[in-house]
Each structure stands twice: as structure tokens, then as C-alpha cells.
Amino acid sequence: MRRIHVGNALSAFGLGFTVPYLYVYVAQVRGLGAMTAGLVLAVFAVAALIVLPFAGRAIVRRGPLPVLLAALTMAALGALSLGLAGSAVAVLVSAAALGAGQAVMQPALATMIVDCSAADTRSRAFATQFFLQNLGLGVGGLIGGHLVDTARVSSFTLLFAIEAAIFLLLVVLLATVRMPRSPRLEGAPTGSSRGSWKQLLGNRAMVQLCVLGFVLFFACYGQFESGLSAYGVEAAGISTSALGTALAANTLVIVVAQFAVLKFVERRRRSRVIAGVGLIWAVAWLTAGYAGLGHGSREMATAAFVATYALFGLGEAMLSPTVAPLVADLAPEGMAGQYNSAFALVKQLALAVGPAVGGPMAAALAGPYVVTFLLFSLGITFLALRLGRRLTVAQDRPWTAAKSRVVARGGAPTESVTA
């Protein structure tokens, strides 16, 4: 588990090391223009959407570790070639390889955590993963920003070479992990993934969780670097430095509060915790509304905007030990990889649609933008409470299962949660 967490932290470090500077690298340093730079960012999302449906089946058939090692190798090749690419075609192909590799890492690492944890340790394991991911992203972005120089192509080549070396180091490190033998899925189709997807779609609780997950990522993560930042600059009139402070406040709350929050949520029903996140984010959107529409001073607007990002960070800290373990507990034996990949696909869709909707709306219609996402946050609360009625006691209250070392996985409720 320690090696897996190191892998999570280093893969996040590599992501934060280069991705924030991709646009500048392609558009300005390589001189390929804004259109090509925009296509590179789109290719990242498209590559993830293409590979994730196949990644889950590969994890089920081959195990998460071989899939992770293949993804790391692909990402390393993509990063190295991106640093050397000089034409638009080479940049796009390299970005596709890097994006596909990074997309597959997420469900593979999540499945490894599931296989190496038990009901009473899984929430803490996923909380640690989220903590290290945010720490890795923040440190990677900070160091990467000090290494690059837009006047020197070689500084970006070095940046991508270091990222490739990190991924190859992870291949060596994680190749030494001895995974517990995962149970084989009886009756799984050998020729295609159609049967496993059909089985997943037949799990009503998982389908409801995917709908809830889409709303979660669309209304929060999908707005961070697009809609909400555009709203802050245009409607609230905050400076770019204040926007950076708000993003730092979000990360700081996650890093500082993660394990204190974990103690609070470990003995709470998962559906109620997610419902509470919806209410916290509703307050965050109300605070954002005050920042942009409250007609207060510039200082008050800035403080309110920073508080908005901090409240989002508190909600994220509550979700990390809740949602990912719930996905694992909903999966039948041997299907954790398929379920993790399906949920990662939903997340990727939300992250692709969120900025496309939120960015233009925030810039042109500030008031309706805040109201819309306030309603989405309240929708999170509604969907979470509705999901809670479909979960078993063991899925919604995992500490009861931990006492008996038995977790109900993937089935319909056998008794009322309120019983």
C-alpha cells in the first residue's frame, strides 16, 4: 500500500509538473498557435474517453498492476515525445499518448487500493490517496513553474523529460509490488466487454451513483479552472493574484483538513455525507454570489471568493473517503476494475462538459450562472439521499461491516437502511 501511495503522489506530481504549461508550450514556445494548443487540451479529454471503456475490462482480465505498468510506459513515451515534438501532428499524437496513459492510471491505482485494503481501512486509504494527489499536483506545479522559461525551448524539453523519467521510475517501483490474488469473475465473457458493461448497467445503485458523480464533477471540479475563475474575474472583479490565492486556499483546506474530516465521516452514513457536501457547496455558491453580485468592496469580494474555494475544498475532503470506497463496495467480486473505470469515465465526461458550459455562461450571465450551480448543488443532496435508499447497510454504513469483516458487494439491499 505504501508503494501504491508513492505511485499516486508521483503520478500527480508529473501531472502538475507539465499540464499547467501545455498551452503556453504549444502556442508560444513551439509557435503552433492558439488553435493547436486548444486541440492539444481537447485531445487529452478525447483520449481518456476512448481508452477508459476498455481499461476496465483489461483490469478485470489482466489485473490492475500490468495495466498500470502499460499505462505508465505509454505516458512516459508520450511525455518524452511531447518535449521533442516540433510539428502540430507530432504534438497531437504525443498528447494523445500522454492523455491516454494518465487516464488509465486512475482506475488501475484505485483498483490496487481496493485489492490491498479491507472494509475498515478502505476509507482511510482513499483519503490518503486524495491527500497525496493534491500535494503532488501542488508541488509539481510549483517546481515546474520555476523550471520553465518561455524564451528557451530546452527548458520545456527538460520538463517533459523529467516527467517521463518519473513515470519510468514508477514502472520500476511498482513492478516490485506483490498484489493479493484477485478473485476471478465467473462467467465473464472472453471475447468482449459487452457482458460486463451490461452487468454494470443492471446495478441500479451503481447507475444512480454514476449520475450523482456526473453532477458532482460537473458542478465543482468542472468549474474550477473555467467557469468559476471567469466569474471571479468578470463579475467579482478580482485580480489574477487573488484567483491564485483562492486556488491555494482550496488545496490548503484539503491538505490540512483531510484526516480531521476523515474521523468525522468514518462513522457517518455515506449517503448522508455526500448529501452534506451538496449543502456545503450550495453555501459556497451563495458566497460566490455575494462576491460577484453583492456590490461590496473589492476586499470583501476577494475574501468571499477565497472562502468559496475553501468551502469547495472542505467538500472535496469529505468526498474522498466516501465516494471511491462506495464504488468499490458496489462492485461484485472481481469487477472492481470495471466499476472504477466506469466511474472514471463519468468523471471525465463531466470534466469535459463542465468547462464548455460554465465558462461562456459565467462570462456572459453571471447571475444565472450562480443560480444554476446552486441548484445543481442542491440536486447533489437530493440524489445522495435517494441513493441511500438503494444501498445495503454494509454499503452505506461500512463500519458495521468492518466489525464482522463482511462487506455486501454489488447486490440489492437485503434490509432497510433505516431498520
Image: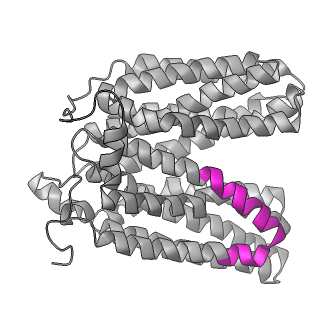
Residue at 54% x, 21% y: name it. 74
Return the residue found at the far left. 404
Q: Is residue 418 left or right of residue 346?
A: left
247 up-or-down from 62: above or below: below
190 up-or-down from 289: above or below: above
The count of marks equals 0
Q: Which span of residues is magenta-colored?
A: 351-371
The percent position of residue 293, horizontal first and vertical second, equals: 78, 81
Residue at 86% x, 22% y: name it. 152
The percent position of residue 222, horizontal first and vertical second, equals: 63, 56
> Which image quadrant is residue 82 in?
top right
In depth, the one of 36 and 241 nearer the eye is: 36
Indicate whether residue 355 is drawn in magenta: yes
The percent position of residue 390, horizontal first and vertical second, equals: 28, 68
Q: Is residue 154 left or right of residue 309?
A: right
Residue at 83% x, 83% y: name it. 295
Magenta span: helix, strand or loop, mainly? helix
In depth, the one of 24 and 331 nearer the eye is: 331
Indicate whether residue 139 is drawn in magenta: no
Quadrant, the C terminus: bottom left
